[in-house]
Amino acid sequence: MKPKLILRIAAIVLILHAIGHSMGAFTWQKPDSGIPVEVVQTMQEVHFDFMGKENTMAAMFTGNGTAGIILLLLMSVILWVVSGWNNKFVTKILWIVFCAILVLAIAEVIYFFPMAYMLCFVAAGLVLWGIFKMKKIKE
């Protein structure tokens, strides 16, 4: 399999992760999703000052979820774009993306659930495979 295809599959895996992340990030405030109604209401109602801005835990939770979606999509676009490059900088970029995905996977092992971290580990493995396939082509 060519590195371009491997990296594009990794990009698609991250897009799938972003879609799943979107489903969770934008539906968690609906009480029928298994989250206790009282917890959601408290997160929405209790306001506090955080670094000079009045906020709620619900807003911060949704904001962090949105940021995660943006970053997953950014990594997908980077993988898709660089998969077609054939210069010496590609592997440097891919190592950075690989490390970012791996660290994200570890954070997901700690804070989330198997489907989330499995997608990241699969994407990280594909990126690593793509890196080594590219090195073989260049040699």
Image (cartoon, helix red, strand yellow):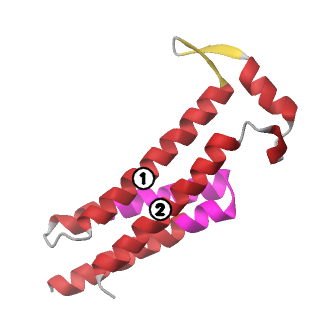
Q: Quadrant of residue 131?
A: bottom left
- 120 left or right of 43 in image: left
Q: Which residue is mark 1?
A: 73
- At 60% from the left edge and 35% from the top edge, which residue is drawn? 62
Q: Which residues are magenta?
A: 95-119
Say what secondary structure mark 2 lies in: helix
What amino acid type is highlighted by mark number 2?
Leu
The residue beneath circle 2 is 14
Image coordinates of residue 102 in percent, x first then y, are 47, 62
Q: Which mark is first along the chain, 2 or 1?
A: 2
Q: In the depicted view, which residue is nearer to us: 137 or 36? A: 36
Most foreground residue, 105 or 19: 19
Residue 25 to residue 44: above or below: below
Image quarter for residue 95?
A: bottom left
Residue 47: quadrant of the picture: top right
Question: Please, is residue 66 above or below residue 43 in the view?
Answer: below
